[in-house]
Amino acid sequence: MERKYLVSSESVTEGHPDKLADQISDGVLDAILADDPMGRVACETLVTTGLVIVAGEITTKCYVDIPRLARGIVKEIGYTRAKYGFDGDTCAVITAIDEQSPDICQGVDHPLEVREGDMTEEEINGVGAGDQGMMVGYACDETEEFLPLPIALAHRLARKLSEVRRDRTLAYLRPDGKTQVTVEYENGKALRVDTVVVSAQHHPAVESGQIREDIIREVITPVLPGHLTEIPPRILVNPTGRFVMGGPMADTGLTGRKIIIDTYGGVVPHGGGAFSGKDPTKVDRSAAYMSRYAAKNVVAAGLARECKIQVAYAIGVARPVSLMVDTNGTGTVSDTVLTRIIKEHFDFRPAAVIRDLDLRRPQFRRLAAYGHMGRIDLDPVPVWERIDRAEILRKAAEKSCC
């Protein structure tokens, strides 16, 4: 039976207040990992008019000048004038940092943890998860990023919106911005882009008609694939008619509040907590990356058109309490077989995840805007975006069918 439906996903620019908070939190994490790869970090940021608050639990051997770091990130993103609603030179920065709870440490710490690359099976089993919870990884064959089409297009538009601001193609734009894409599907296949929404912060003197014309020409048209716009989509640019007040002055920003943008745009459920500001012992982050890595390699191997993986942990316990694979009926082998193959070729114990995905190095601030998954635009590409295990999985599936 024919089934048509619409799916929407959104993204935001690096100047959105929630993303500003994410970048500060991950900036603190990267600064600590650069000097102390074993540092424990749970860093949360709040930004509002004239104020940055950085709070959390951090245990490290190094020193990070958090106020200076936060101001630098604010200015690098583009908030350099009070007219923009926020100014990195004049905003106040308040820190409230404590050390990690010893109750958490006792379930995660291991006397030989500094040697993750050389750890024995017994030592890996001795490093437990930093928290309980379930994490979800997903991949599909709709785009080159192995992401659902709506979120992939929304991210591309958001990056382009920032690009034309930064290179001054549209010099009147300011840092805050949002994009949203609605795609029409028929029986699981993308047919066309139905609606595009772009909200772009701007100088007050620029007329809405000019903004619409410029955004369509410089942002939307270069990004949207022609075969998806043969029937012209509905385009909404700054639907309220004005977007002058933006950033933290208009909307308080918080770390982790854009987790659906960080992952799969709402196409699949999100499991555990958010990512930014968390060191890799937090399985909220590391297990979500590993689940994505496994799912992407399953799809790249041609074993399914889409693959969703849920993994769950108990705090202080190394091995997951459950692992579920769902290909939504698109698999070339059963989900039961895929579950067994994934368990054989991907080690979801926290110490092994950190080792295999190289998560002890500073690399996270670059992920704090435009998504943590599908980031083939980055150099180097994150390990969890590689498809280097696809052939191994393909051969394992062939063997299981013999």
Image (cartoon, rainbow, N blue to C red):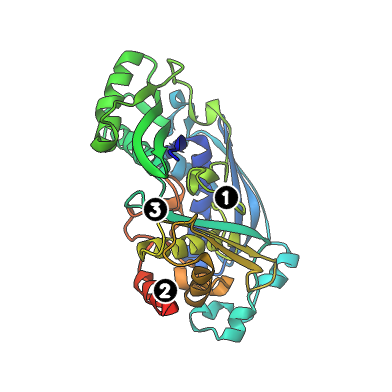
Mark in the foreground, 3 or 2: 2
Label pair 3/1, CB-CB below 8 angstroms: no
From the top left corner, tell me how far across and down residue 50 is, in percent.
Answer: 55, 31
**Residue at 40% from the left image edge and 38% from the top image edge:** 185
| Residue in front for this viewpoint, 7 or 84 | 7
**Residue at 35% from the left image edge and 52% from the top image edge:** 145
For label 1, the crowd category at 10 Å Cα-Cα, with few meaning under 14, some 14 to 19 and many 20 or more, is many
From the top left corner, tell me how far across and down residue 223 is, in percent.
Answer: 28, 37
Q: Secondary structure at mark 2?
A: helix
Image quadrant in which the N terminus is located: top left
Identify residue for label 1: 270
| Residue in front for this viewpoint, 286 or 134 | 134
- Give amino acid for label 2: Ala
Image-quadrant location for residue 162: top left
Above or below, 134 relative to 388: above
Q: Is residue 63 visible?
A: no
Image quadrant in which the C terminus is located: bottom left
Q: Give the numbered dot on residue 397.
A: 2
As drawn, the residue found furthest toward the right would be 103
Above or below, 218 relative to 370: above
Q: Earlier in the sequence, mark 3 or mark 2?
A: 3
Identify residue for label 3: 374
For label 2, the crowd category at 10 Å Cα-Cα, with few meaning under 14, some 14 to 19 and many 20 or more, is many
